[in-house]
Image (cartoon, grey):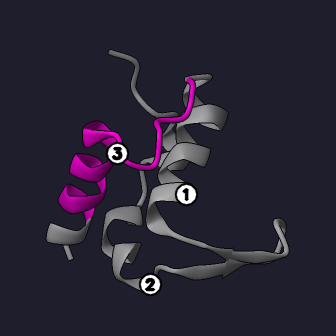
Amino acid sequence: MRQLPHTHRSNDARRAATFPKYIASLGREVTLEERINQCRQKALGAEPWAPDAPELQAVAALLKSLN
């Protein structure tokens, strides 16, 4: 399994509670699930998960539990 680059291994888990959040570079508010998919695409070159994918919901739940 690929690891996220060091720049992505930050305190993002603690920030899960701040979503939905306005992302200026996108010009709109995004959900935690959308942000997870953006990170998957940019950092890992992976395809985004479907909004109802169990994997996406599990990662979001994990991040929320770390707050």
User: Marks 3 and 1: which is nearer the front?
Assistant: 3
> Residue at label 2?
18
Q: Image point 30% across, 58% down: which residue?
A: 60
Query: How many residues crowd around disc 2 within 10 Å: few (fewer than 14), some, or many (20 or more)?
Result: few
Query: How many residues crowd around disc 3 within 10 Å: few (fewer than 14), some, or many (20 or more)?
Result: some
On the image, the x and y values in percent for residue 35 come to 55, 57
Type of the residue with mark 1: Arg
Q: Image point 48% across, 51% down: which residue?
A: 36
Q: Secondary structure at mark 2?
A: helix
Is residue 24 shown left or right of residue 37? right
Q: Image point 42% across, 57% down: which residue?
A: 10
Task: State how far apart marks 3 and 1 are (Cα).
Answer: 11 Å
- The answer to whether mark 2 and mark 1 are in CB contact below 8 A is no
On the image, the x and y values in percent for residue 27 come to 85, 75
Quadrant for residue 65, please give it: bottom left
| Residue extent of the magenta highlight | 47-63
Whichever of labels 3 and 1 marks the residue nearer the N terminus, that label is 1
> Residue at label 3?
56
Quadrant for residue 44, please give it: top right
Type of the residue with mark 2: Thr
Q: Image point 62% across, 22% down: which residue?
A: 45
How many marks overall? 3
Circle number at residue 23: none
Whichever of labels 2 and 1 marks the residue nearer the N terminus, that label is 2
State whether residue 34 is above or below residue 66: above
Type of the residue with mark 3: Leu
The N terminus: image quadrant: top left
> Residue at label 1?
35
